[in-house]
Amino acid sequence: MSHITLVLPHLLPLPEFASDLVRALQTPALASLLTRTSTHARSAPADTARALPHEQWLARALGLAADGQPAFAAAAMRGFGLDPAAGTWFIVNPAHIQIARSHSMMADLRHLGLSEDESRALYEATRPLCDEVGHPLLYGDAQTWFLRADDWTGIDGATPDTVVGMDVTDFVPRGKQALPFRRLQNEVQMLWHSHPVNAAREARRLPAVNSFWLWGASRDGGRAAAPLTSVGVPGWIRGLSGRTLASLDELDAALARDGILVVGYLADAAIAADWGTWLQQVQQLEDKLFAPLHAALVQGRIKQLDLVLSSREALAEFTTTAMAQRKFWRRPTLERLT
């Protein structure tokens, strides 16, 4: 029997929409998992300025937090077969910055649609600039690169999902230590402005890759302290994962052993406040995820299931077992999502 921790970002709807959304859901298996529990708790992290609640939870659970901030870079590098060696490494995400009249915003990286060929071309063009200033740049996947900058102490950028939809200027590193970073960023932006990749993308009416986001500083070469399986997640979480599922059709393999399972399918719709799509996706998770988990519990294939659910503002944790699921006098509801 296994002990599974399910991390499901953005299953908690924002308070102003929660009641209406919960009434629209028909998810009896999820209701049983949330109602028939041995423990449950809800909290509001004190500081979500640099990382969302589930990202903070992952950093703590995996032993990858530094000064209270996620330090994912080195562990994610290993997942891509890269050796962080010594030094300070950052995660680098190619990005599209939207310029508005009064502020700038970073588009959701999930919408960038950057292919491997496009990303490789931009990477190869950028690498000499980084080498010239003594900061090696390594390639993970189309959305996930890594930069070594031992002297950029004090630059602890926010996670991309924290920044999406917000004014980017509120998150840009400042001060004397940030000057070399901003100088490199400006040079890269100028290089990419006229790059053939962006000319071709604009011809296809795709957003230009006009900047990059830097975050996740890791200074100790850390390794993830717990086994992680993921599905539907950004590249940096895939890098942290010992196993990545192609879809939830492969769920049984993930339930056969202890570990953390991160399911990222709800992030896109929730961040965009597209609640109609969010409802459809939660209904799909009822069939593909919640019902199989409930059956595995009742059948004794899972000894204990911990659920870690989040929104942009809150974190909720639940623990249930086969014994807890026998508490028939507790009428299953979704009230704990609100």
Image (tube, grey):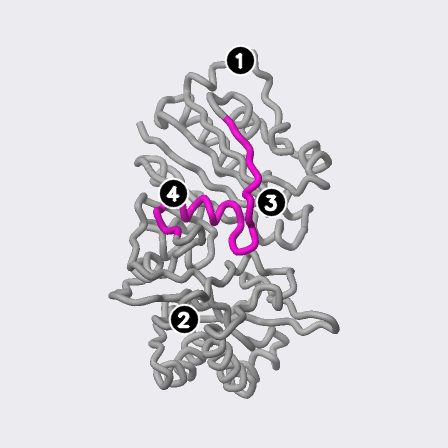
Q: Is residue 64 magenta?
A: yes
Residue at the spot of label 2 = 152
Q: Earlier in the sequence, mark 1 or mark 2?
A: 2
Query: Which of the numbered marks, if any, corresponds to residue 61?
Result: 4
Magenta region, residue range: 40-65
Say which residue appears at 45% left-offset and 44% top-offset.
Answer: 57
Q: How crowded is mark 2: few (under 14 residues within 10 Å), some or many (20 or more)?
A: some
Say which residue appears at 40% left-offset and 45% top-offset.
Answer: 60
Q: Position of residue 159 (x, y in %)?
A: 50, 58
Residue kind at label 3, given as amino acid type:
Glu
Q: Residues within 10 Å of mark 3 (few under 14, many from 20)?
A: some
* Badge 4 vs badge 1, beta-carbon distance below 8 Å: no
Q: Distance between the residues labelled 3 and 4?
A: 19 Å
Q: Nearer the viewer, residue 170 or 266?
A: 170
Residue kind at label 1, given as amino acid type:
Phe
Q: How far apart are marks 1 and 3 (CA)?
A: 32 Å
Q: Which of marks 1 and 3 is nearer the N terminus?
A: 3
SS class, disc 1: loop
Of the two numbered discs 1 and 2 in the rendering, the one whose residue sits closer to the viewer: 2
Q: In this view, does 24 lie to the left or right of 65?
A: right
Of the two numbered discs 3 and 2 in the rendering, the one whose residue sits closer to the viewer: 2
Residue at the spot of label 1 = 328
Of the two numbered discs 1 and 3 in the rendering, the one whose residue sits closer to the viewer: 3
Q: Residues within 10 Å of mark 4 (few under 14, many from 20)?
A: some
Q: Nearer the viewer, residue 188 or 324?
A: 188
SS class, disc 3: loop
Where 86 falls versus 62 (above or below)? below
Query: Which of the numbered marks, if any, corresponds to residue 313?
Result: 3
Q: Can residue 99 be seen in this view?
A: yes
